[in-house]
Amino acid sequence: MKILTIESSCDETAAAVVDEDRNVLGSSLASQIDVHQLYGGVVPEIASRSHMEAILPVVSEALEEAKIGLEDLSAIAVVNEPGLAGSLLVGLSAAKALCVAANKPLIAINHLQAHVYACRVAFDEDPFPCIGLIVSGGHSSLYRCNGPIDFESLGTTIDDAAGEAFDKVAAMLGLPYPGGPSIQKAAEKGNPKAYKFPRPMLNDHDRMQFSFSGLKTAVRYQLAGTGRVDFSECHISEQERADIAASFQEAVCDCLVGKATQALRKYGMKTLCVGGGVAANRRFREKALEASEKYRFKLFIAPPKLCTDNAVMGAIAIERYKAGLFSDLDLDVSPGLVRDK
């Protein structure tokens, strides 16, 4: 079995070829970070146009590295949910065209489930059943994963995602996009206990949800003062910037790790699988490991290169292929993510 996987849910154009043993035969990725840095965040229209330019070269490069042609594939898989509508449509349209050209079946991939499955690929060990935590620019979600393709949503963010909060706080601090790596670097010289930022919803043990807008606002008030809208003339020292970055990062990590630990206890699970761009954060990984040792659960965090959006995690298509879960060519994208009430 050889499957071509395509990822274009946000601002990374990626393709990979994987076999039934989750070996990566070929992989290619085109990043748009340099393009979106000019705007301090992802611009959907620019993202979709960039995908159009990159999609076929990226697919060709993955196939070339795998030393196979379209005729050698068993199926073609593509992310169709969730994500940016225009970006998803580029990947889905390309996948459909390749399926028609090569007479291959189409497999739909859920981007969030694929992030959890990255742990299965990275460690070559079956982590299911488990609690799945996805932390990225657009998502902060908890799942009960009864199997590799059996996911039950437990809760998500009721406002900003963790990665989005990182980007916005970085902008407030005058740090470059993307915010996660910038804040992590600034925090290295800061004191995580310098400022007592809130840990929203951490004490609500009944709801498996996140909230980061209030934390983001607390940082803004710390910089500009309560009630002020404009803080463009706010001046802080490098040490203050480092301390705020470290304190903010600590609060986010406490919320993410704390909620995941609550979910493990509530649903009687012994394994936590983590994926998504924020999972590459060094402090988050440290705190997750500390929690796993304290509460004695098994922890799987995808390596940094598989935390950010990529097509290798699309190997979840292997599970769908084995289960006979193929899609018709009238498959559509599903951009949105329904937030829990």
Image (cartoon, rainbow, N blue to C red):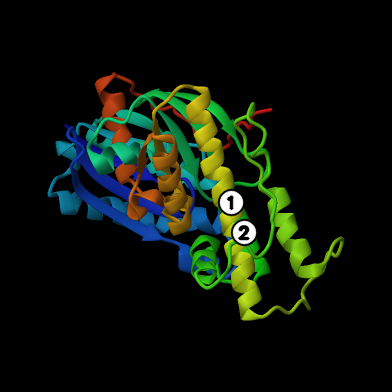
Q: Is mark 1 on a helix, strand or loop?
A: helix
Q: Which amino acid does label 1 sit on?
A: Val
Horizontal and vertical percent position of residue 85: 54, 42
Compared across the picture, whether 68 is left or right of 148 comes to left
Query: Is 62 rendered above or below residue 240?
Result: above
Question: In front: 318, or 287?
Answer: 287
Residue identified by numbered label 1 = 252
Mark sitting on residue 48? none
Q: Residue furthest right?
A: 227
Q: Is mark 2 on a helix, strand or loop?
A: helix
Q: Which residue lies furthest to the left in this view?
A: 67
Q: Which residue is pictured at 27% across the width and 25% down the height?
A: 321
Q: How far apart are marks 1 and 2 (CA)?
A: 6 Å
Horizontal and vertical percent position of residue 30: 36, 59
Query: Is 269 rendered above or below residue 251?
Result: above
On the question of residue 139 being in view, the answer is no
Query: Is 2 rendered above or below residue 199?
Result: above
Residue 217, by quadrant, is bottom right
Residue identified by numbered label 2 = 248
- 1 and 2 marks in contact (CB < 8 Å): yes
Q: What residue type is labelled 2?
A: Phe
Compared across the picture, whether 329 is left or right of 256 comes to left
Question: In front: 78, or 290?
Answer: 290
Q: Residue furthest front?
A: 294
Horizontal and vertical percent position of residue 299: 36, 39
On the question of residue 126 being in view, the answer is yes
Horizontal and vertical percent position of residue 338: 61, 31
Question: Which quadrant of the rendered structure holds the C terminus?
Answer: top right
Question: Which quadrant of the rendered structure holds the N terminus?
Answer: top left
Badge 1 crowding class, 10 Å Cα cut-off, few under 14, some 14 to 19, many 20 or more, is: many
Query: Is 266 rendered above or below residue 259?
Result: above
